[in-house]
Image (tube, rainbow, N blue to C red):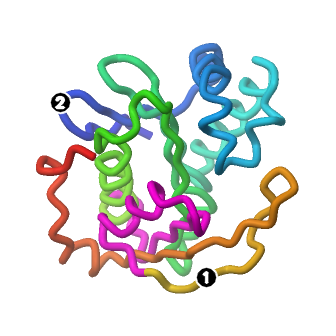
Amino acid sequence: MQPITVDAQVSLQPVMVADAPEIFALVDSNRLHLRQWLPWVDATTTLADMQKFLADASQDNKQGCDATFCVVHAARKIGVCSLNAINKSPGQARIGYWLAEDFCGQGIMSRSVNSLCQFGFAVLKLHTLILCAAEHNEKSRAIAERLGFSNTRKIMAAEDLYGEEVNHIRYALTVSQFEKNDYDPSNYSA
């Protein structure tokens, strides 16, 4: 996979095991922020945990079953976004992402996910992208809605998040919806 240019300051770089120290330090310094919505944070306690995740993600990238990228801002890794469970037939994938707290509210993830959608539709020739967000995760849901995803349903008790059942809202975006989308990343900063 090749890097994806999002804008003049942001790019998506395919993950590598060599990214482990930087990404682990980012997770470690953002634990309280990330664990609000991500069930894997408490299980990622060592550099070896991150190395294993990145080794698996790199292998999945090579095999074409996932496409996992570091979000890079001004040469600094600030998060991760990915297309997961890529299925060429029927042409679907799931989107996942997280961002360091200091970079939230600047439109970085909206622009990154928009570029990831473009990659999924134009390069991978997918038909539909799925994004599931916790029902009360307003920031994540706002990204889906801003980018023109359709709210397709509520999934009850979709996830156990540290002992609490969390409902998800499932969003979908088709290639035809994306092509009609009036989202202009240059005009969005939140």
Q: Amino acid at mark 2?
A: Ala
Q: Tell me the SS state at disc 1.
A: strand
In the rendered image, residue 14 lying in the magenta stretch gets the answer: no
> Would you place residue 141 above or below residue 172 in this image?
above
Residue that sits furthest to the bottom in the current view: 153
Residue type, numbered disc 1 = Lys
Where does the image place residue 166, in percent across and percent down from the top left? 73, 66
Instruction: Determine the secondary structure under disc 2.
Output: loop
Image coordinates for residue 121, horizontal then vertical, percent: 35, 65
Task: For the residues labelled 2 and 1, say whether their Cβ atoms are less than 8 Å apart.
Answer: no
Task: Give the label on residue 82, or none.
Answer: none
- At horizontal 61% and vertical 82% (from top left) the residue drawn is 154
Provide residue 161's location: percent of width, then percent of height.
78, 55
- Residue 136: horizontal and vertical position, in percent? 57, 64
Return the residue at label 1. Answer: 154
Please tell me whether residue 144 is drawn above or below residue 157 in the rendered image: above
User: Depth-wise, is mark 2 or mark 1 nearer the camera?
Assistant: 1
Region rendered in magenta: 123-150
